[in-house]
Image: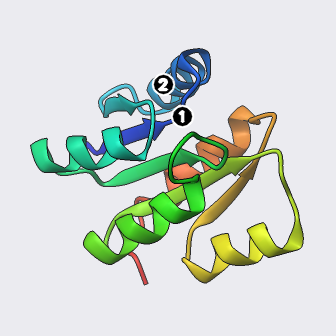
């Protein structure tokens, strides 16, 4: 079953790295990119997105704020937030959104497990 993933990060290099991970593990999936939360919502208007991988630290709305807005607009989307900032309050906010927490530096196997988990229906 093909899915559409969006990678949201202000770092082009990070987006390219995550795109590569997704396509190595799910070569038939579509991967879109956005440099910030405004780009995320612009892409949502263009196509259906099944999975969002969002960096926490971005200009404008941070990843947690973007994920909360995404969850309100598209509750069925599977969300992972990537961050090197593992403060309890941030991790708790990620969990409150029923999103996955992926620590930086990104571990390919962790991303692969997250992608596999998105094949299950959202609870």
Residue visible at 31% across and 72% down? 76
Q: Nearer the viewer, residue 24 or 107?
A: 107
How far across and how far down the image is residue 55, in percent? 60, 44
Q: Earlier in the sequence, mark 1 or mark 2?
A: 1
Residue 18 as seen in the image, left or right of residue 83: left
Residue visible at 70% across and 33% down? 108
How far across and how far down the image is residue 107, in percent? 76, 36
What residue is disc 2 on?
19
How far separated are the C-alphas under marks 1 and 2? Answer: 11 Å
Q: Work out which residue is located at the far front of the displayed protein and give it.
A: 60
Residue 29 in view (yes/no): yes
Q: Nearer the viewer, residue 108 or 66?
A: 66
Q: Mark 2 falls on what kind of element?
A: helix
Q: Mark 1 falls on what kind of element?
A: loop
What residue is disc 1 on?
9
Residue visible at 81% across and 34% down? 105
């Amino acid at each position: 079953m093909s899915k559409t993933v969006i990678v949201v990060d202000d770092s082009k290099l990070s987006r390219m790295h995550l795109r590569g991970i997704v396509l190595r593990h799910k070569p038939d999936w579509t991967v879109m990119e956005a440099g910030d939360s405004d780009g995320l919502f612009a892409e949502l208007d263009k196509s259906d997105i099944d999975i969002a991988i969002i960096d926490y630290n971005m200009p404008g709305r941070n990843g947690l704020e973007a994920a909360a807005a995404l969850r309100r607009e598209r509750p069925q989307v599977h969300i992972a937030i990537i961050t090197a900032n593992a403060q309890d309050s941030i991790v708790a906010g990620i969990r409150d959104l029923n999103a996955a927490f992926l620590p930086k530096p990104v571990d390919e196997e962790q991303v692969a497990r997250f992608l596999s988990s998105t094949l299950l229906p959202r609870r």
